[in-house]
Amino acid sequence: AGPSTISKIAETTGFEKNLVMWNLMGMLRWGFVDVASEEGDELTYVLKEA
C-alpha cells in the first residue's frame, strides 16, 4: 500500500476517522510515517522506510 489519506484508511479498514487520525498522529510523532503531500483538503501519509 502506498500513500493514503485519513479518509481512505478509514474507509478501507472500517475504523472511524477520529481513531485513524489519533493513531496516525502518534505514528507521525514517533517517526513511523511522513506527510507525503496534500490531496484536496487532506494530507497524504506514507510509511517511512525501515
Image: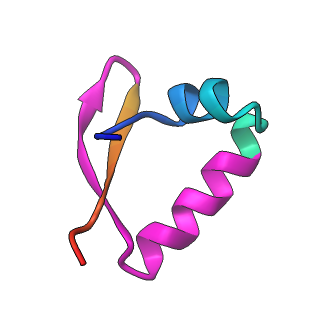
Q: How far across and down, in percent of the image, does residue 25 sit?
A: 54, 63
The residue positioned 44% from the left and 33% from the top of the image is: 5
Residue 15 falls inside the magenta stretch: no
Q: How far across and down, in percent of the image, does residue 26 sit?
A: 56, 71
Question: How many numbered circles does the render carry?
Answer: 0
Above or below residue 46? Residue 23 is below
Residue 21 falls inside the magenta stretch: yes
The residue positioned 67% from the left and 35% from the top of the image is: 13
The residue positioned 65% from the left and 47% from the top of the image is: 20
Q: How far across and down, in percent of the image, does residue 34 sit?
A: 29, 60
Query: On the rendered structure, is 13 left or right of 28?
Result: right
* Range of magenta residues: 19-41
Query: On the rendered structure, is 10 left or right of 6?
Result: right
The residue positioned 36% from the left and 78% from the top of the image is: 31
Task: Tell me the quadrant of the picture where the C terminus can be found.
Answer: bottom left
Q: How far across and down, in percent of the image, does residue 24 sit?
A: 54, 58
When asked about the image quadrant of residue 43, the answer is top left
Above or below residue 40? Residue 12 is below
Task: Tell me the quadrant of the picture where the N terminus can be found.
Answer: top left
| Residue 17 or residue 3, whichever sits in front | 3
Task: Name the residue at the front extreme.
Answer: 1
Above or below residue 40? Residue 17 is below
| Residue 50 or residue 42, whichever sits in front | 50
When asked about the image quadrant of residue 39, the answer is top left
Above or below residue 50? Residue 7 is above
Q: Tell me, what colour scheme is on the image?
A: rainbow
